Amino acid sequence: MRLLELTISGFRALDSIALPLCDDFGAPRPLTVLAGPNGSGKTSILFAIVQTLRGLLRYQTARVPLPDDLDVRRTRADLLAARPDEALCHLTLQFDADEVSAIRELWDLSADQHRDNEQQAIRNVPDLPNGRVQITWGYPPERTPVGVRPSWWARDISPRGAHPWLWGYGLLIRLWTRGRLVEPRRYFQAVGGLRFYGQHRDLASEVQPPDDADDGQITTERSVNSADLSLREVLLSVDRRPVSGGGSAAPDSPTIAELITSKFNQVCAPRRYIGVRYPGGGPVGHPYLEHNDRTYPLHYASAGEQVVLDHLARLSYPSPLGNGIVLMDEPDLHLHPTWLRRWFQLLPEIGGDNQYIVTTQSPVLRELAVRDNILFDLGELG
Amino acid sequence: MTPTQLYRSSYPRTGDAALLCEGDLLGFEVAVLQRWLPTAVVGGEAVDIWPCGTKDAVRGMLDSIGRARPVAGIVDRDWISYPTVRAKLESEAKGLQARAVQVAFYGAWERPEIENYLLDECVLLPVLTSQFGVSEDQVRRVFQDLGDSEVARAQVDQLLQWIRSVGGDVARSYEGWLRGDEQLGPWCKPKWEAGGWQRGGREAIQDCVDRALERLPEWSEQKLKDRPLTPDRISRTWHDWQAGERGVQDVPGKELLQCVCAEVAFGAQWRANSLGAAEPGSPEYVRTLLRLLQPALAAQLVKTLAEHEHAASDEWWALADTCAKMVIPHAGL
């Protein structure tokens, strides 16, 4: 799934903007960096994407509040008007041939198990001309004869009835949590999901060890597709899980924890992540790091270490995200320039073939973005 | 991208050591070195890459910042032989070190310009075929054709430089005469016309030079009396050049890269929105095209160097070793 075009109007800090997401050769850029001063609308762009897609992709996150009146940009004239203005976001998604094929297979698998209910009807998913789906979302929510639509409801989808394509990732999670996929990794690589990394991280509360023993295993469908699990929960959950996602994986298949360890150690060297340890052989596990001869638990790690682990863990959970859309709001916060450069270099290798949209105020990230022709400047201060 | 964006995105520096090079903020030097160094050296991100513009500026900046930070400098060798340039720069480095400048390395690329490293098939073919949707054979044809022409042109330039170096003021008039040859002149530089670079083939250029040399004795009797530049010497030098094994890696790399990319892009009917009304083959078109292709070309060069697929991998790994020595004391941040 790739975001090809995005236009936003009247949303939060944004008056009207069209964001080019393809390069001059017509291909979607794997990474786009949005830079600009405070209040220029960087975060608003990421929020608009989440608001437009959260309902359709069944993506749950408390890091972007559900749409409300504050999402509508107001001018001085609007304040005097009785009725608020309207926020609109229009975007075009592209599904490649592998993804289309994988989603069809998932619906077939699902329908085989539910021949007598509504899943049968949904098997008849429409064809996608050029693999494209156009979505329009707006606020305030639409009124219908039977009431008001939910605030995350998309106003228009083209081609009509294309919803099953957007539900692909949610369906993948459902089938995976029920153990119905023989080769999960293949689907996780092909079917794209959405990830949002907020700017206001309260990682301290996410890394504390629990008061009571727990094994950190999260397997319900709802929790797996949620962005709101704590970092500790995610790390515990993936600690011994093979990258293949289970199924017919070879016994020596690398674990997701090994993948996270390898990437973390490349970005944060000489500090190292060493995985989950169980002090004293007890039942309560906790993620640990190492530097020189000192070993320390996750809640003792620096903010920068926690941020890098947060990126790596969530992109690898429940299986490394492939073909997805990843939104990161100022990921440079807390990172030393050298770590930031390494992180930037490594980003395309984290997970699969994802599309990243990243905001920043860091001169280091700006420089790297300019070098790669991926900077979108939202203006100057004042 | 505007110059203001570039400037604001490039300063201040945060590294522990500096590698100075030619080229500007938009140049291939900084694009390639910034990508490559972190892949080749542990702690390579801590080496700031400074594009200084010119050789003189590199030399000046070594002096300027080299007492505060470990520094290295690398410049184009252009058309001087590599051993000659290396000996000269090593001597200069010793002079700097004697004045407490922490120069870890001061040398030159073994190829004339950094763009020459992008002309290898392992770099050029994957990038141009994927970006423009053309076949490898199409790229090879354009490259071979333009490459032949550029080799011949480089030979003419070498001859003219040599004439100038041994003939002094008198040679300058001869050089003007040779350059002004009505047939040689238009072939000296590829010119964009009707959808392609009009260029002289190797044979056409050599014919023109041969004719010029045939006229040389009569001319030189009047102009070169008692000078070291004799017709025999010129003629012998020219034919030595022709017999030499001078491949496309010895041509002006930047110019050949521009020509090949522009012709392939035009053949694929490519046009970027950012080009506005610029005509294909115009300087603006070529500059924009190279700027848009730069990330992909740089990334592919870095990939082939890392995987030892590139013919110049050893040279680059030697540079990596030098840079590693600069940052190892700082590797723990």
Image (tube, rainbow, N blue to C red):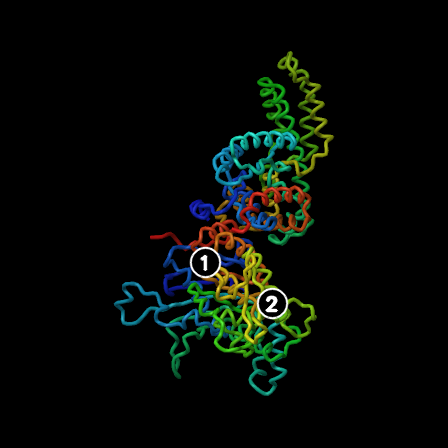
Residue furthest to the bottom: A116
Q: Which residue is drawn at the image coordinates 63% and 13% (left, top)?
A: B222
Q: Which residue is drawn at the image coordinates 70% and 33% (left, top)?
A: B203
Quarter-of-image position of residue A283: bottom right
The kind of residue tagged 1 is His
Number of disc labels? 2
Both marks 1 and 2 on one chain? yes
**Front position in the image: B150 or A306:** A306
The answer for which chain carries disc 2 is A
User: Neighbour class for label 1 at 10 Å: few (<14), some, many (≥20)?
Assistant: some
- Relative image position of residue A307 (x, y in whole percent): 49, 62
The kind of residue tagged 2 is Ile
- Relative image position of residue A189 (x, y in whole percent): 61, 67
* Residue at numbered disc 1: A334
**Front position in the image: B183 or A318:** A318
Q: SS at mark 1?
A: loop
The answer for which chain carries disc 1 is A
Residue furthest to the front: A280
Q: Counting residues from the N terminus, which is met first, the one under dot 1 or under dot 2?
A: 2
Residue A27 visible from this viewpoint:
no
Residue A256 — which label? 2
Task: Give the distance between the C-alpha atoms of the residues marked 1 and 2, in whole angstroms.
Answer: 25 Å
User: Considering only vertical position in the picture, is A366 above or below A184?
Assistant: above
User: Considering only vertical position in the picture, is A320 above or below B81?
Assistant: below
Residue B332 visible from this viewpoint:
yes
User: Neighbour class for label 2 at 10 Å: few (<14), some, many (≥20)?
Assistant: many
Quadrant containing the N terminus of chain A is bottom right
Q: SS at mark 2?
A: helix
- Relative image position of residue A159 (x, y in whole percent): 52, 72
User: Considering only vertical position in the picture, is A330 above or below A165?
Assistant: above
User: Considering only vertical position in the picture, is B256 above or below A282?
Assistant: above
